[in-house]
Image (cartoon, grey):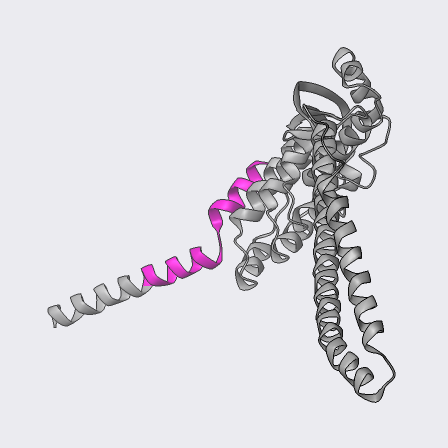
Amino acid sequence: MMITALVSSVFALFVFFIAVALFLHFVPIGLWISAIAAGVNVGIFTLVGMRLRRVAPAQIVLPLIKANKAGLDVNVNQLEAHFLAGGNVDRVVDALIAAHRAEIPLPFARSAAIDLAGRDVLEAVQMSVNPRVIETPMVSAVAKNGIELKVKARVTVRANIDRLVGGAGEATIIARVGEGIVTSVGSSDDHKAVLENPDHISRTVLGKGLDAGTAFEILSIDIADIDVGRNIGAELLTDQAEADKRIAQAKAEERRAMAVATEQEMKAYTQEMQAKVVEAQADVPHALAEALRNGRMGVMDYYNMNNMLADTQMRETIAKSGPPQPAK
């Protein structure tokens, strides 16, 4: 009987501890006492309701105590709704406290919207107080005289709280600044003028309103480095001359091919004519024989014709040999 009573007592004690553990799990007494000690009005049933809604009470009560001590007007429902929406309650409260200390108007709704948009709202508030410097990559630009300049700039920006939701990011700022540098250098007649007055680039680019539609406000644009690159104009002229030379060579080759083709045609024509002459000469004896046979030509006529041909051949030979040399 004593053993049975002892087992019953141990079992009852075990059940009691389980019940106390479940009670403390669903009823966070420690957080409730901390909230009361901090002057934050959070009911015990509110904490139990958080457990039932699968909300971690510590992630709501502790930021609420922090906000209350900082003098912010934030309630439990706002923090719990932001937590259920997937936001970071502690970061939002820290951002609200930082904005309140810096006297930056930042309502809870806007802070929660910035956090839910995926931006670091605390970092944005810190950037509003302490502007950040963004360094652009090396930007290549060409002046009107064809000289390339490689420019690197430092852009000082401050977060614009009102445009953090829906505003463009740092990549847009860098792209716009690079475009402004290219435009400013490209409008300069001589690269030396840019090297003498690099602040002209800063003033020109800054005056274009590059921060429109972005989540930042550009405070200044400073030229960090300028290097002289290649002579793009000379390279383009050289490439153009090379292209013109190739075109001229192609046209000359075309004319040469046409001349060769014409020469071949003339040779073929000459050979054809020579063949016809030889053929005609071969027909002459037959014609003479036919004429003598038919009586259209006498023997004396034949002899006179031979004498005329011999005389003509003699004259051609004398003409080819040149005038007679005088006797020595």
Which quadrant of the rendered structure holds the C terminus?
A: top right
Please state which of residues 159 and 108 is positioned toward the viewer in this rendering.
159
Query: Is residue 20 a member of the stretch shown in magenta?
Result: yes
- Look at the image and tell me whether residue 243 can be seen: yes
Magenta stretch contains residue 109: no
Relative vertical location of residue 206 with respect to residue 92 in this rendering, above or below: above
Percent of width and height locating residue 49? 58, 60
Residue drawn where x is 52% and y is 40% of the image:
34
Residue at the far bottom in the pictured view: 294
- Spot the residue most to the front: 300
Residue 5 as seen in the image, left or right of residue 321: left
For the residue pair 61 and 208, the one nearer the viewer reads as: 208
* 112, above or below 298, in the image: above
Residue 104 visible (yes or no): no
As drawn, 62 above or below 13: above
Magenta segment boundaries in residue numbering: 16-38
> Toward which corner of the image does residue 55 lie, by quadrant?
bottom right
Q: Quadrant of residue 318?
A: top right
**Residue 82, horizontal then vertical, whole percent:** 65, 52
Q: Residue furthest top?
A: 196
Question: Residue 128 location, x and y as percent?
Answer: 71, 29
Quadrant housing residue 8: bottom left
Q: Residue at x 75, y 49 (%)?
A: 251
Name the residue nearer the viewer: 40 or 162: 162
What quarter of the picture does the N terminus occupy? Answer: bottom left
Q: Magenta span: helix, strand or loop, mainly?
A: helix
Q: Is residue 243 left or right of residue 90?
A: right
